Image: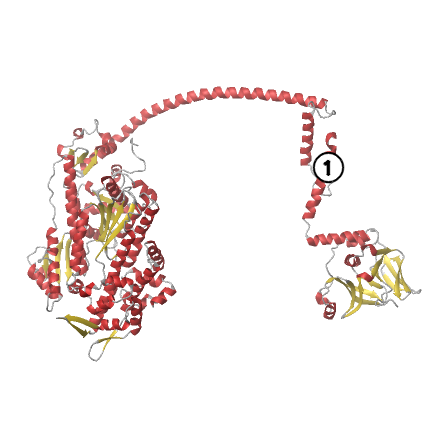
Amino acid sequence: LALPGTNGIRLTMESALTARDRVGVQDFVLLENFTSEAAFIENLRKRFKENLIYTYIGSVLVSVNPYKELEIYTKQNMERYRGVSFYEVSPHLYAIADNSYRSLRTERKDQCILISGESGAGKTEATKKILQYYAVTCPASQQVETVKDRLLQSNPVLEAFGNAKTLRNDNSSRFGKYMDVQFDYRGAPVGGHILNYLLEKSRVVHQNHGERNFHIFYQLLEGGEEDLLRRLGLEKNPQQYHYLVKGHCARVSSINDKNDWKIVRRALSIISFNDNEVEDLLSIVASVLHLGNVQFAADEQGNAQVTTENQIKYLGRLLAVEGSVLRDALIHKKIIAKGEELISPLNLEQAAYARDALAKAIYGRTFSWLVNKVNKSLAYKEGEFPGWRSTTVLGLLDIYGFEVFQHNSFEQFCINYCNEKLQQLFIELTLKSEQEEYESEGIAWEPVQYFNNKIICDLVEEKFKGIISILDEECLRPGDATDTTFLEKLEETVKNHPHFLTHKLADQKTRKSLGREEFRLSHYAGDVTYSVAGFLDKNNDLLFRNLKETMCNSENPIINQCFDRTELTDKKRPETAATQFKNSLSKLMEILMSKEPSYIRCMKPNDAKQADRFDEVLIRHQVKYLGLMENLRVRRAGFAYRRKYEVFLQSLGLVTSPPLHCPHLGYKQEEYKMGRTKIFIRFPKTLFATEDALEVRKQSLATKMQATWRGFYRRKKFLHMKHSAIAIQSWWRGTLGRRKAAKKKWAVETIRRFIKGFIYRNHPRCPENEYFLDYIRFSFLMNLKRNLPKNVLDKSWPTPPPSLCEASQLLRQLCMQNMVWTYCKRISPEWKQQLEQKVIASEIFKGKKDNYPQSVPRLFINTRLGNEEINAKVLQALENEAIKYAVPVIKYDRKGYKARARQLLLTQNAVVIVEESKIKQRIDYANLTGISVSSLSDNLFVLHVHCEDNKQKGDVVLQSDHVIETLTKTAIQADKVNNVNINQGSIKFTVGQGKEGIIDFISGSELLIAKAKNGHLTVVAPRLNSR
């Protein structure tokens, strides 16, 4: 049933309630049993099973990491949520992002989105998706696109330097991040700013089993170019570096460090890093690896000495400091007492501590410098974005969630303190927004009972009596302060606090679960046991003075900025890590309080990072420490459901008649309230009963509406069709009549012209016969087109009419020329040469020599002898003369006519007769006067030469098995085609000076060549009848 004004693409929250048994409710405030944690988790499980990973608690979004790709982040989905009312579409990250963006634009009030959850819950991905949403949906220009690119590309850079693989997450953020995105009056992003909190510097020097150091180290080693690594003194193998092997998983199949390196290098260029800055930054990264490989050994006095000089050389070059000064600073400590400087050597343990402290300080300060550099790139520049100076800000807080591990230390203490503050802020702002909404709608506010965790925040941060103050006091006091004395001081100061417990203060039963060096805090999310081991060192975060001095003298521009010289002259003790964190957290609370907040609570379904696996125990743990049940309880303390009247009517108003007359449905007065612009329903069962009533009435309502609509629609359609049919019929009848009349008229005129033309067909062309003559010509041409000759031998041709005889003759000539031209065009050069030789042979021998017809079907060959068959001496004697044709022949002596085997060679200039390796006779073509051959089928021929040529002995009598071929090629080569004589009876030839010989040719049954008694050479040749 499509309701008026609804969009088919949008799925309203209420329309999904019909499937609530299968997929649960998409807002937890609609849970009937809202106080049941089991019901809460079951609703999450149902939705997770259906790949519905987002659920609301009022305006708070709960997100469950699916650990797989879902097709819900496309541009089409972004457009679906763009500019749409919060509850008109199903829960999604984009709904939160768009709602904050629209509030920022319409109310001109700064917004913030708080994203929290434990490592692996998807906080970082959620931040990326929100930034991508704004990049796609916000107004754009060339300058804005640059800002968008920098906002998006700041992520991979900060992830490379601040994220690492942990047991719970392959891309775990090891720092808190708050990013402000500035928007101009048009709503386009024009700048940004990032604040970072509590980078886990201890990871630089130590990683638990199965975890890695920060990504950038592995990306540099895997993806760095050979030349770059050589300059940095690095090898591609991470196993070579002490700081990278402690977790025993330097390489991870699910992480492509080489590809990530390319992304980071590209991102650095986009956020305005030049080549020199990149080189300086990577030098610092490499220096940390080299620092980890610095080793020490004890001398005779037990003092530490550096044993790895090679690493010191690399460090001196990379950090741009004196190597000897750095070496001394690593194994000595400078103390200033009463204005005097004292240098004391360090033992092995102290030297290792100094080395690790320097590595952490370098990396931590470089990370802060990197964030500042990114901020400069993102800074809003009024010159680039002229117009209204006013900008609004939307903040994104991606910060660690509540952490409870088997071993909890200083880092977990700070993180959980941060979450206590955020929970305090969350409850205060939620109650505040609830109260404001009630007051604006004119509904009486009912006080809500909730757990106020201010008591825990005070326990941690209160001046003089709080845990941080006691920790600082223990770090600063003279004497032998240790982690144990800190614990004792805690027990003495806050022993009566209900949320604090130690082994000493606990009862007999509780002591079994508490170590002597541990204390337990009862947080809003549950009890957490902390080990005090390392608390003082981590809080002090000290770097020996001489190491600071060495770094301050560095010529590396980044190191020089990170280590300010004023630190050396400032006699004020630097703030401890806990105090710095408390102060930065206080500033963050001020920032968040000044903005309208939105919340995203991220959860992980299992620890194995597997898709479609829902671990109830882990989920219950997260529901507890995220404070979701407390959040739901506060939200449900008043009314579970509230919507603007128009939205409510659109989705559920069909039930009421007249609208909003609820008592006839059996609702009690306390179950609902009517505000100024909204209806408030206290219990979900009331809303579900309304939904169920709508389901019951849908069938009858739909039937009635369908019947009314169909009747109206069909009648309207019938009347329209009737009118259209009449109009079409009228027009069609007229068209048919006009066509028929025109056709008859054309037929009559055509017949009349044809008859008149036939009558005048023999007259000169005139108006009376032109149509007939044109038709006759056309008919002839069409007939000719169908019956053209297929080849040059086809002599058929249609008989033309008298008026086209001349044209027909011309066309026939053209057709024949075209066929001949086509045939000639297809002839290859070799075949053309063959045909030319055959044509000359035909001119010479056709009808004149008996054995000519037998030679016609046989192709002439280029040569009958290959070079290998001709003696090499002959080829050498001929030098540069190319042999055009060679054939074996029989030569008959001039005296006695004795037959001798010879070779006949045709060159460019002469006929050469060869006997094995000797040239017997050479006849230049100029001296060749003619060629004689008989008309019979014999193979004899005579080459006639000039008698005046003293070099020649007389004419040459030869016999060739290929006489037609041989004579044709000789005639062509010597240009003697017209000098070939075909004789009948006898041939005379010159034997010597003034002497003649005669060859007699006689027909016989078989070929016979012999000398006759009369001294003539007699040739008997069989007569062939083919001539």
User: In the picture provided, is 634 more to the left or to the right than 137?
Assistant: left
Looking at the rendering, which quadrant does residue 699 occupy? Answer: top left
* Coloration mode: secondary structure
Confirm whether residue 741 shows in the render: yes
Between residue 4 and residue 305, name the one nearer to us.
Answer: 305
Q: Amino acid at mark 1?
A: Leu
In this view, 803 is above or below 152: above
Looking at the rendering, which quadrant does residue 939 occupy? Answer: bottom right
In the image, residue 457 lies at what x, y percent? 12, 53
In the image, residue 96 lies at what x, y percent? 25, 44
Q: Residue furthest right?
A: 1014
Between residue 1000 and residue 303, name the one nearer to us.
Answer: 303
Confirm whether residue 604 shows in the render: no
In this view, 142 is above or below 751: below
Q: Assign a secondary structure to mark 1.
A: helix
In this view, 428 is above or below 504: above
Reading the image, the residue beneath label 1 is: 810
User: In the picture provided, is 982 more to the left or to the right than 299?
Assistant: right
In the image, residue 6 lies at what x, y percent? 29, 33
Image quarter hosting the N terminus: top left
Between residue 946 and residue 220, name the one nearer to us.
Answer: 946
